[in-house]
């Protein structure tokens, strides 16, 4: 019996982590019991930092409708606490809650303060969880980044003009970073990133849809980069990240973080929301290895991630 329950719990956790939206479940004692992988990526707080603890007071007060209309972002709670506030400072869920439970399920625009201090606009939905007798069991909060939600692509894109680093730019940056590693031993690693849905999207929706999607993925990835890292386009559907993580293990962990960030990319085409996942290959520079060999290792690792079913990070072993 215990083994079956453990297997069910593991399955449930995997299912929650597969969701594209951040999902937080708070029990009747205002304690976090679920904090899925997308919630980690969007908020910057890990599951270990939140599960089993009381939800920050300002986080829950707003979601429950306790925040006053005079509130402004950043004026309540201690710095560094992830908390939600509406874009207008008012709480939209309380009105009509007692008489119309469905009003609580309307997603609204909020501003979430990331663990690192910056603001992340998000669309958040709050649902009160109740038992068969109407008693309150807890709350469910689901959210996703809200950047450009009101700007739906309509078949016209900038043709890649918004890409900060083209492949030609990246070739120059690669050579520069590789020379720096050779002369000063500044750590140098690569992450080869591809969007699992890119080829199929290009086939079914056309090039404009594919380019619009890649633009949104690029914006999402930039939110997860280290300050000294460089991201640029590489090929038709891919990106390359130049990283300076000290070890291959740290590079893999960072790649997993970027994969989570990629899942939060908000992409809509003519109103349809399309879920995205990334396959990433990582390669860390080694003594006597050429830049071309390192690129081949990163590409091979990326292809291994695709072969594993996508939504995966693989490491090249040379």
Image: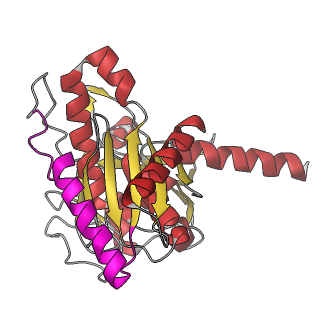
Q: Is residue 304 left or right of residue 126?
A: right
Residue 70 image offset from top left, x and y in percent: 13, 69
In which quadrant of the rendered view does residue 100 lie?
top left
Please determine whether, in this image, residue 66 is positioned above or below residue 144.
Answer: below
Q: Is residue 112 visible?
A: no
Give the residue displayed 27% in from the left and 17% down from the top: 205
Q: Is residue 84 visible?
A: yes
Q: Residue furthest right?
A: 1
Give the residue displayed 37% in from the left and 25% down from the top: 199
Please determine whether, in this image, residue 2 is positioned above or below residue 226.
Answer: above
In which quadrant of the rendered view does residue 156 lie?
top left
Q: Is residue 94 left or right of residue 305?
A: left
Residue 78 image offset from top left, x and y in percent: 31, 83
Please determine whether, in this image, residue 175 is positioned above or below residue 117.
Answer: above
Residue 207 image offset from top left, x and y in percent: 22, 23
Tally of numbered tags: 0
- Principal SS element in the magenta part? helix
Give the residue displayed 28% in from the left and 51% down from the top: 220
Please determine whether, in this image, residue 183 is positioned above or below residue 279.
Answer: below
Residue 140 image offset from top left, x and y in percent: 48, 50
Does the magenta segment cover residue 174? yes
Q: Is residue 154 left or right of residue 225?
A: left
| Along the viewing direction, whichever of 40 and 9 lies nearer the viewer | 40
Residue span colored magenta:
159-188
In which quadrant of the rendered view does residue 42 lie?
bottom left
Name the quarter where the C terminus is drawn.
Answer: bottom right
Give the residue displayed 29% in from the left and 82% down from the top: 79
Does the magenta segment cover residue 11? no
Look at the image and name its color scheme.
Answer: secondary structure
| Along the viewing direction, whichever of 149 and 123 lies nearer the viewer | 149
Q: Residue furthest top?
A: 204
């Amino acid at each position: 019996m215990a083994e079956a329950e453990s297997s069910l719990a593991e399955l449930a956790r995997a299912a929650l982590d597969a969701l594209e939206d951040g999902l937080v479940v708070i029990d009747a004692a205002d304690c976090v019991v679920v904090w899925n992988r997308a919630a980690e990526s969007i908020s910057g707080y890990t599951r270990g930092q939140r599960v089993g603890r009381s939800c920050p007071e300002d986080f829950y007060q707003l979601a429950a409708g306790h925040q006053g209309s005079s509130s402004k972002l950043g004026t309540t709670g201690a710095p560094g606490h992830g908390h939600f506030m509406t874009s207008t400072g008012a709480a939209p869920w309380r009105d009509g809650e007692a008489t119309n439970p469905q009003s609580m399920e309307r997603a609204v625009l909020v501003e979430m303060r990331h663990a690192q201090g910056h603001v992340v606009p998000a669309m958040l939905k709050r649902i009160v969880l109740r038992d068969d007798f109407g008693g309150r069991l807890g709350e469910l909060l689901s959210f996703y980044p809200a950047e450009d939600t009101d700007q739906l692509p309509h078949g016209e894109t900038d043709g890649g003009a918004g890409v900060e680093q083209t492949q030609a730019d990246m070739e120059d940056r690669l050579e520069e970073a590789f020379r720096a590693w050779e002369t000063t031993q500044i750590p140098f690693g690569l992450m080869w990133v591809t969007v699992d849905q890119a080829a199929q999207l290009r086939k079914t929706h056309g090039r404009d849809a594919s380019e619009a999607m890649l633009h949104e993925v690029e914006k999402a990835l930039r939110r997860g980069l280290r300050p000294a890292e460089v991201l640029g386009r590489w090929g038709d559907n891919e990106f390359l990240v130049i990283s300076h993580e000290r070890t291959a293990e740290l590079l893999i962990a960072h790649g997993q973080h970027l994969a989570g960030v990629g899942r939060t990319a908000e992409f809509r085409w003519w109103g349809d929301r399309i879920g995205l996942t990334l396959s990433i290959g990582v390669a860390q520079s080694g003594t006597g290895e050429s830049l071309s060999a390192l690129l081949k290792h990163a590409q091979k690792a990326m292809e291994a991630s695709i072969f594993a079913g996508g939504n995966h990070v693989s490491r090249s072993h040379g």
